[in-house]
Amino acid sequence: MSFLNNLSIQSKLILFLLLVALLTGAPIAWIGHQSGKTALEKHVLSAMEGQRNIRHTQCLTMLEDTRKQVVNLSSAPGCINALLQFEKAFQALKQGGDYKLNAEQSQELDKFYRDTFLPKLASNSETPPIDEAFIPEDDVARYLQYHYIAKFPELEYPDGKHKTERCGDGSQYDEVHGRFHDNLSAFAASFGFEDVMLADLDGNLIYTVAKTVEFGTNLINGPYAETHLGELFRAGRRLRERDAYRFADFERFAPILNRPSAFIASPVYHDNRIAGVLILQFPINELARIVSGDFQWSNEGLGATGEVYLVGKDRTLRTRSRFIFESRKKSEETGDPKPFDNVMAQLREAGLPESVLKRIQRQGNALLALPVETEAVTQALAGHSGTGIYTDYRGKRVVGSYAPLDFEDSRWAVVAEMDEDEAYAPVWKFTREVVTVSAAIAVAIPLLGLLLSSLFLAPVRSLTSAAQSISRGEMGTQASVSTRDEFRDLADAFNEMSAGLKGKTEQLEMKVRENEELLLNILPAPAAAKLRGGDSVATQNFGDVTVLFAEIQGLSEYSSTQGEDRGLALLNDLVVAFDDAAEQIGVEKVKTSGATYLAVCGLSVQRPDHTSRVVEFSQELVRIVERINRDRGSRLRLQVGINAGPVTGGVVGRNKFIYDLWGETVTIARRLGVRDESQSAVRLTRAVRERIQEQYPLGEPRLTELPGRESIETWQLTTKSAEVS
């Protein structure tokens, strides 16, 4: 202590400030850094989990839609009739001796195989295909393949043969084909199916839309009996329920030149007996589009390195690899092979065999070619969900989230990933900022102490006298100072003043808390934070919320008959009930103006189901109005408009301010809610309808005119009346 007593005031001040900065600033900086880092890390992991959940839900919806399509089509009278007619015509070919190929036609079919099909198949195969394994021997199969495939060399194989409607051979089969082919082909095109196939109970593939070389063959003893297609047919033939189905996972299918394919099948029943099997070739491109966000990864919030993909039980990809897709596309657009070669080099460094790399290069994609032996895939295929940091199939460290995706007997792993460097860039940026600020403070404090000591040494006695005069009153806690310099007098004076200020400080703190609570009752938390930070407007853009605008009609008529006081009381009861419902459902009230009510969901608190909450809230508002009408004998109507999309929020006014929302989304909702209708109604935009899907009953769409803009298509929500208590 003698050392400190001998120091000058200036030296003591500098030393004191430096010690205070180190003893208080360092722990605060460390705690702040750890808290911020933890929050950012949770946000990164949550973002990946959100991406995974979205794609998981979308894939399940797509798979369920596919199941419904195959079951519904197999039960449709048109499909049943087509199967029966094709089976009859196929048997006629089989039994009739006039419908066999002559020598020239037979040579043309063999020539098609040797000059077209087999060379193309060889270009996408590891080993050369054997002729005898593919060229059919059955007379009917050869006859059909010649007349619908080989006879038309101008149609590209395998993607153009479906264009043949009639072959012109005069057969009963050709007549049946001409009647049904257009409708079945249109069905396949409408729903993205690669092929529609009909097989009789004997395993004969009596019809296909695509007209590839499995057409006409037998799925029990023919060349494709041991493929997934053959196995699927045999499983489908054993089904004994009309709405049953079976799914065959991806495999490389020789008839389409070893492209990946998957199939789904359902039995076709006629007169309470199974007549055959309907088989649809799975819409692979649609699945890839859904998982990749229409191949717009960056626009889907996945940055420059994020992707979502599916992996099958064989641990190969079921969808596109973003890096292979984008690099190949860039190389093709620029004519520079380096982008694609760089990705191939990364995969080679990750340990992929050359045979796999060559297959990827031949295919132009990684479907069924790229093995994914990561911890995420292992856990997902074992039925576990989770999020973490691990090494991906490129050998890169990634932040990923994974979960199993089960459909029928198949299980896929759905994985969402982003490179660790990109995902944690905000965390590392925050760390650098904390270190930089801490270093700046450590340098600034001694300089500040030097400046302050120079300023305060001369007037210290006058400051002590002023402090003593201000602090006359109740004495507070005493500060103990052992030094014999001017700070002793200053400390005594300040101790006296602090006692008097204690009560005022407590009152001030209480007032600050009251003001804070009042501010949060008026503004959303983000806007309140900006306002406290000095932003008088507190403008903020919100990328995706759902807005409700409601207008209470009939108040003027009620007030004119019952009196203005009762009208105002009725309006107050309505608004209070609306506010209670909003709080219960998780919707934020923005403002009430006269007989209008503006609310939003997804603003202060991000909610993935914000649209469903607002629709539920609108139904509750209608029920509240109906209940008020019954209790008060009023004839109020509620007109509600709901829209979803981006909005801008901010403070309007200075002394007496309000919080308001504006933007295209709000304008449309407002105009939908301002209508003169005879009864309460809730109208939704297309953006809302697409999000709620079939959760709520909707009326038929209609065009709604909006002043000053083009008409838009809207739907009226069928609301449930309030229960009579």
Image (cartoon, rainbow, N blue to C red):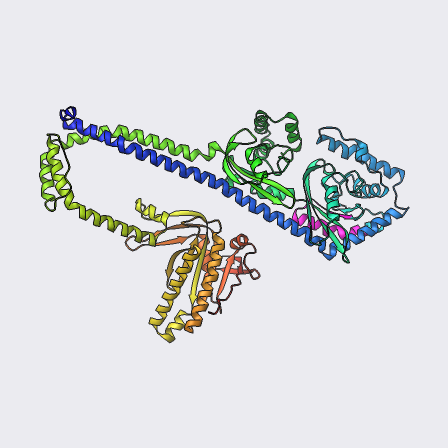
* Lateral position of residue 641 relative to residue 506, left or right: right
Magenta stretch, residue numbers: 175-199
Is 673 a magenta residue? no
Which sits in the foreground, 580 or 650?
580
Residue positioned 22% across, 28% down in the render: 447
Quarter the N terminus occupies: top left
User: Looking at the picture, how far across and down is residue 552, in whole percent?
Assistant: 42, 65
Residue at screen point 41% across, 47% down:
541
User: Residue 477 sits in which quadrant?
Assistant: top left
Could you tell me residue 35's position as x and y percent? 37, 37
Quadrant position of residue 670: bottom left
Task: Give residue 84's position: percent from left, percent from top.
Answer: 79, 53
Q: Residue 25 versus residue 499: which sits nearer the camera?
A: 499
Q: Is 186 above or below relative to 223? A: below
Image coordinates for residue 196, horizontal then vertical, percent: 72, 47
Position of residue 200 relative to residue 356, above or below, is: below
Magenta stretch encompasses residue 183: yes
Give the camera-side residue of 366 and 278.
278
Residue 708 visible within the image: no
Residue 149 in view (yes/no) = yes
Q: Judge from the rendering whether residue 125 lies leftward or rightward of residue 708; answer left or right.
A: right
Determine the residue positioned at 37% across, 66% down: 573
Q: Main secondary structure of the magenta part?
A: helix
In the rendered image, the residue lying farthest to the right is 97
Q: Which residue is farthest bottom? A: 561
